[in-house]
């Protein structure tokens, strides 16, 4: 089934969330027309700053999170970096191992943001070592229901297909009731 995905962000976020019924930054639609209606509403707040990312196709409904461990001198720093929904795991790995996030100038900023606000801002280099890297996904099915934190596996893919097929067959509410009673 083709879905229409929209990720929006920017300075307009507090105004949009206060003045509209749009409360999420990651949205899935069953038609291009529905997505265009939301985009038109968001564009009314463009003067505050608005960025959009659109994708079409069979969506995974998963949020990509990198679990990171960095080491500088004798101290280790651990944090999670949220890349949002529909972000490819391979791109996260590329960012941290080969691209901008592999440089000390960016890694020092991440340590400041997530672990130690007093960490010095370093120049470009490779003194901060990546000691732990793992990509995790959070699956969401219909209505943004967070089910469980899982690593990408064949079992996860089979479970996603089962839940999607099951929800199409008997309806979202029945699936949610079934899951609530199952766990």
Image (spheres, rainbow, N blue to C red):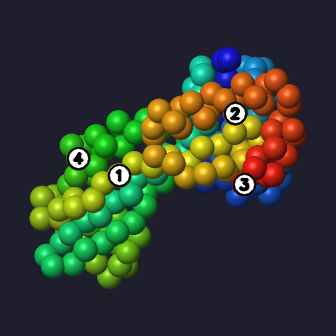
The one nearer the camera, 134 or 120, is 134
2 or 1: tag closer to the N-terminus: 1
Q: Secondary structure at mark 1?
A: strand
Residue under label 4, please give it. Answer: 97
Q: Residues within 10 Å of mark 1 (few under 14, many from 20)?
A: some
Q: Which mark is residue 163?
A: 2
Image quadrant holding the N terminus, namely top right
Note whether 176 is above or below 32 in the view shown: below
Q: Choose mark 2 or mark 1, whichever is in front.
A: 2
Pointer 4 with pointer 3, Cβ within 8 A? no
Residue identifier under label 1: 134
Is disc 4 in contact with disc 1, using a CB cutoff of under 8 Å? Answer: no
Q: Secondary structure at mark 2?
A: helix
Q: Position of residue 121 (x, y in %)?
A: 25, 71
Please state if 113 lies on the left or on the right of 145 as rendered: left
| Residue 136 position in % (x across, y down) | 45, 49
Q: Earlier in the sequence, mark 3 or mark 2?
A: 2
- Residue bearing the label numbered 3: 183
Horizontal and vertical percent position of residue 180: 79, 52
Q: Earlier in the sequence, mark 4 or mark 1?
A: 4
On-image quarter of the C terminus: bottom right
Q: Nearer the viewer, mark 3 or mark 2?
A: 3
In the rendering, which numbered label is found on residue 27? none
Q: Is residue 154 visible?
A: yes
Q: Confirm or deny contact between disc 1 and disc 3 (CB under 8 A).
A: no
């Amino acid at each position: 089934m083709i879905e229409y995905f929209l990720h929006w962000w920017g300075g307009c976020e507090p105004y949009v969330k206060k003045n509209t019924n749009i409360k999420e930054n990651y949205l899935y639609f069953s038609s291009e027309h529905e997505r265009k209606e939301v985009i038109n509403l968001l564009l009314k707040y463009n003067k505050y700053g608005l960025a959009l990312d659109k994708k079409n196709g069979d969506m995974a409904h998963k949020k990509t999170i990198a679990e990171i461990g960095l080491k500088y001198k004798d101290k280790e720093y651990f944090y999670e970096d949220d890349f949002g929904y529909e972000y490819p795991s391979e791109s996260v790995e590329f960012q941290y191992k080969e691209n901008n996030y592999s440089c000390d100038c960016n890694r020092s900023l991440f340590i400041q943001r997530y672990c130690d606000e007093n960490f010095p801002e370093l120049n470009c280099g490779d003194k901060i070592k990546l000691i732990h890297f793992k990509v995790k996904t959070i699956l969401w099915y219909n209505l943004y229901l967070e089910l469980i934190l899982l690593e990408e596996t064949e079992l996860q893919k089979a479970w996603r297909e089962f839940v999607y097929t099951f929800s199409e067959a008997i309806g979202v509410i029945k699936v949610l009731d079934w899951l609530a009673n199952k766990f």
